[in-house]
Image (spheres, helix red, strand yellow):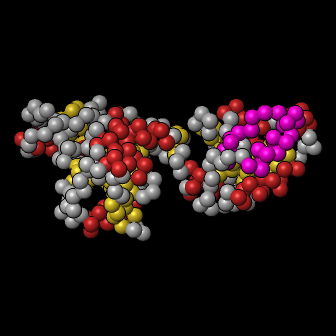
Amino acid sequence: MVVDACDYRVELKRPGTFYCRHPQVFSALNLVSAQVCHGCSQRLKPCSPRSVPSHLDDIDGEWKFYRTSDLVTQAHHLASQLPSEVDAIVGIARSGLLPATAIATQLHLPLYSISKQRGVRDLGTGGRGTGISTAEHPHTIAIVDDSVFGGIAMEAAVKLAKERFPFSEIIRAAIYVRPEGARAVDLIGRLAPAPHFFEWNLFNCLQAQYAALDFDGVLCQEWEGDEEQDPVRYQNHVESARPLHLPRRGIVPLVVSARLEQHRSACERWLARWQVSVKRLVLGSWNTAAERRAQYSAGEFKGQAYKRSKCTLFVESCERQSREIFEVARKPVLALSTGKVFH
């Protein structure tokens, strides 16, 4: 079949597959076939072609760790793919508000939140956004989420949005989408096969219920210094270290730390202060820090505790120790400092 030339059609590496850049085409991933193009009348409608998203020929691998900074960067890229007709951004509470806020701020558009508990809510503009007008019936809204696994949350959000904006066109957008759930959205930042991990919700998602954690460098700031030469400052660290990641959705099944057993009470007070519930806290049985330094092996100590548990992920702060733990336990270990996953 001969297809007329079209400024909006971009042929991809896959034979017979095209990406349509026209803002009014909302097929899955904006992918169309030659047959669809042949009968298309969109080319007659004036508008500005959008760029071709990078995800169409580039899919991320499994076991990838996405940082919050990656989420914001992809949100900015996604903003450039939205049609010019979009005049409101709706973020799915709660994680979806991160990319939705970045997009709304970049495009200077009104921002709403959407949730089952509170429906659609206008979030206002703040003092610097006084020039942003909020229309009662926006022409086109973009519903934004941080990720899509199967599409259930997006489907529910669309239903609520239609109740609030019955006359508005709706574009479904997500930053990270599992390939199997791609048909649940219209615009995608990156295709992200499972399993994968997100920095912004790793410690309060379902996966956290099966994760073993390190203490220093994961739950709280890493200790820097010599415990033997400065015991007073170290004791203060154990008692009052600033938190880094606080799992609060459920009970952490296992925390393994090379801290000495003599600090157990202080560790438990710290956990209670920050409302972190731990089922089992494993600490070192060495009598002194010098004895620990002479005998300590992260792989044996942390790896064995992880291996004996039912946990399916260990989150460690150090990449070297992560590798050692994995070699002993032979179960996935995430090195939080570098984002590398050993599996």
Residue at position x 62%, y 55% from top? Answer: 247
Going 56% across and 49% down the picture, which residue do you hit? 202
Residue 82 in percent (x, y) is at 26, 43
- Looking at this view, name the residue that lies furthest to the left: 44
Q: How many marks?
A: 0
Q: Quadrant of residue 249?
A: bottom right
Magenta stretch: includes residue 239: yes
Residue 3 visible in the snapshot:
yes
Quarter of the image where one finds residue 91: bottom left
Q: Give the image quarter of residue 337.
A: top right
Q: Quadrant of the N terminus?
A: top left
Q: Would residue 308 be visible to someone looking at this image?
A: no
How far from the left and from the top, in percent, is residue 255? 73, 51
Seen in the image, is 162 located left or right of residue 153? left
Q: Provide residue 245's location: percent of width, then percent of height.
A: 62, 49
233 or 64: which is nearer to us? 233
Image point (43%, 49%), residue name: 98
Relative to 177, say whether 289 is above or below: above
Q: Which residues are magenta?
A: 217-240
Which residue occupies the extreme front position in the image?
Answer: 127
Q: Position of residue 269 (x, y in %)?
A: 77, 57
Position of residue 155 in the picture relative to residue 318 (left or right): left
Q: Nearer the viewer, residue 295 or 4?
A: 295
Which residue is drawn at the image coordinates 35% and 50% (left, top)? 127
Which is more toward the observer, 113 or 151? 113
Q: Is residue 159 above or below residue 73?
A: below
